[in-house]
Amino acid sequence: MDIHINQQTLSVAETATLAEALAAFGAKPPFAAAINGQFVPKTQYAERRLAQGDKIDVVQPVAGG
C-alpha cells in the first residue's frame, strides 16, 4: 500500500506499522511522528498499524536562538 511521509510517497506492506515505515523512510532520532495530524507516542510506534493513504509527518527538533 502507499502512504505519504513528509509529502513523499512510500510503498509499504499491507500490515506495516509506523515503526517499519519510519525505518524504511530512514528517519533518524530524535524525531516525533504524527499520523494524519495526530502525534503518536514513541511507545506505540511498533504497534500502530498503517492504512492506505495515511499521511505521516516526521518532525525533528530545531535548536538555535
Image: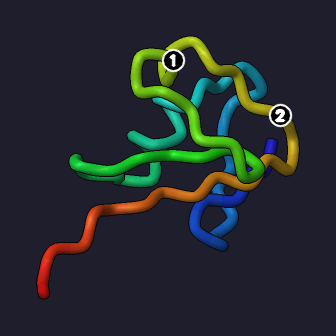
x, y (%) of residue 50? Answer: 73, 31
Question: 9 or 40: nearer the eye?
Answer: 40
Please tell me whether residue 30 is drawn above or below residue 65 in the rendered image: above
The image position of residue 52, as x and y in percent, is 87, 41
Residue identified by numbered label 1: 44
Residue 63: mark: none
Q: Amino acid at mark 1?
A: Gln
Query: Is disc 1 placed on a helix, strand or loop?
Result: helix
Q: Position of residue 26 (x, y in %)?
A: 35, 53
Q: Quadrant of residue 61?
A: bottom left
Any mark on residue 51, and which?
2
Locate the N terminus and report the quarter of the image it occupies: top right
Q: Is residue 56 above or below residue 63?
A: above
Q: Amino acid at mark 2?
A: Ala
The front one of 59 and 53 is: 59
37 lies above or below 19:
below
Identity of the residue drawn at 13% across and 87% down: 65
Label 2, residues with CA under 10 Å away: few <14, some 14-19, many ≥20: some
Q: Secondary structure at mark 2?
A: loop
Q: Earlier in the sequence, mark 1 or mark 2?
A: 1
**Residue 30 as seen in the image, left or right of residue 26:** left
Query: Residue at coordinates 69% horizontally, 43% vertically from top-left?
Result: 38
